[in-house]
Amino acid sequence: MAEALITAFRGQSPQPITEVRLIPSEGGRFEVRIDDELVYSKLATRQHTTNEHVIELVRARLGQ
């Protein structure tokens, strides 16, 4: 997922993704945040997702 996000937004203006931080957790949790704002939470949805879906959510949050 981290690599997919960096690749999808490489060279994007005005806001390229310059850092992805992976924080280990238990129980299969998986969250994506932008500036501390929750964009996706596997724990909340209780569903697996795809890289493409998360990229769409990030694009929407960034207004792209």
Image: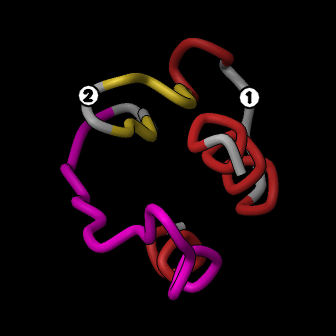
48 relative position to 3: left or right: right
- Which numbered disc flags the more N-terminal residue, 2 or 1? 2
Residue wearing tag 1? 47
Of residues 43 and 1, the one nearer the viewer is: 1
Of residues 18 and 49, the one nearer the viewer is: 18
Q: Position of residue 43 (x, y in %)?
A: 51, 20
Of residues 13 and 23, the one nearer the viewer is: 13
Q: Is residue 30 visible?
A: no
Q: For residue 35, what is the image quadrant?
A: top left
**Callout 1, which amino acid?**
Gln
- Majority secondary structure of the magenta segment? loop
**Callout 2, which amino acid?**
Asp
Q: From the viewer's perspective, is residue 32 above or below residue 19?
A: above
In the rendered image, the quadrant that contains the N terminus is bottom right
Q: Residue at x 51, y 87 (%)?
A: 11
Q: From the viewer's perspective, is residue 28 above or below residue 10?
A: above
Q: Position of residue 53 (x, y in %)?
A: 79, 49
Q: Residue at x 56, y 76 (%)?
A: 12
Residue wearing tag 2? 36
30 relative position to 51: left or right: left
Q: Tell me the element at label 2.
A: loop
